Amino acid sequence: MDTLTNYLFVSVVLFSLGLFGVITRRNGVAVLMGIELILNAANLNFLAFARFGGMNMAGHVYALFVIVLAAAEAAVALAIIINIFNNYKTINVDEVSELKQ
Amino acid sequence: MANFVFWVIVGLTIGSAVIVVQSKKLVYSAYALLFTLLGVTGLYVFLWADFLAVVQVVVYVGGILVLLIFGIMLTNKITSVNISNTSVQKSIGSIVLFVFIAGLGFMVAKTPWASVANSEPIQTTETIGRLLMIDYLLPFEVASLLLLGALISATTLSRKDD
């Protein structure tokens, strides 16, 4: 269990699943969940390299910044999704194709 | 024992991530995301990142996930549990999924990663605090400005126009 490649494989699977979600989901909130999976995979990579690179703490700081950016991104994205719902009565991203009503 | 726990956590993480992207019901996806995030937190603990593990629980599970569930509830009838959550382009998506897993997995397996000798766990919180206040002070301040701007813009965007 204590090898770098194990963590990297978990991260690869998480990233690919997140990408799959972003590609295939129609609901805007579900697309956002896929993005969260991708960000978690990146964070796992940062921490794995920090741990197996001799406890280099810069990786931890970068992971902290990623979490901060994810929080900001989720707040803005949900505000946009709620606005889309108020205008179109749907949040299926493939039906929201007009710029002007 | 630690080995067993590690693989259980890996299975929990990946299994619930599959449910997140596959489930037909959006609420189930949201709850599966909870278990994915908790599994990733467990992996952080295995990586000696205790501070980041706690931050992950507080920010992701306590903040972002609750925000996502609010988003689901505000954009649907609150009484309906079976909020539709269909998928499109599943064939193309599966091709991309397998190409990425195979390609990146091959890359991970074939790369000769530099092996650094295992060091003892250190005081992560103190070191992160020092790094944030000395080496990464400017990104830290920029991140705080960005959070403020993002939250103000989010509240402005979701207000009703009067």
Image: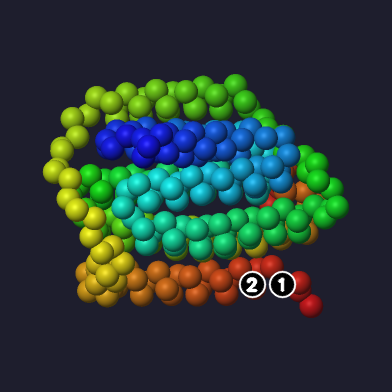
Q: Is residue B27 or residue B75 the one in the foreground?
A: B27
Chain letter of disc 1? B
**Can you name the residue that lies furthest to the front here?**
B1
**Rendered location of residue B131, percent (x, y):** 24, 68
Q: Residue at x 31, y 67 (%)?
A: B125
For the residues labelled 1 and 2, say whether their Cβ atoms are less than 8 Å apart: yes
**Can you name the residue that lies furthest to the bottom here?**
B162
Residue A12 in sight: no
Q: Is residue B75 left or right of residue B125?
A: right
Q: Residues within 10 Å of mark 2 (few under 14, many from 20)?
A: few
> How many numbered badges does the structure rendering display?
2
Q: Is residue B142 above or below residue B32?
A: below
Q: Is residue A42 or residue B43 the one in the foreground?
A: B43
Q: Residue at x 31, y 58 (%)?
A: A60
Residue A49 in sight: yes
Q: Disc 1 on helix, strand or loop?
A: loop
Q: Is residue A80 above or below residue B132?
A: above
Q: Residue at x 45, y 50 (%)?
A: B41
Chain letter of disc 2? B
**Could you say which quadrant of the image residue A21 lies in?**
top right
**Could you say which quadrant of the image residue A92 lies in?**
top right
User: Which residue type carries mark 1?
Assistant: Arg
| Quarter of the figure that contains the C terminus of chain A | bottom right
User: Which residue type carries mark 2?
Assistant: Thr
Q: Disc 2 on helix, strand or loop?
A: helix
| Quarter of the figure that contains the N terminus of chain A | top left
Q: Which residue bears the numbered disc 2?
A: B155
Q: Residue at x 58, y 49 (%)?
A: B34
**Rendered location of residue A48, percent (x, y):** 30, 45
Q: Is residue A90 left or right of residue A69?
A: right
Q: Which residue bears the numbered disc 1?
A: B159
Q: Are marks 1 and 2 on the same chain?
A: yes
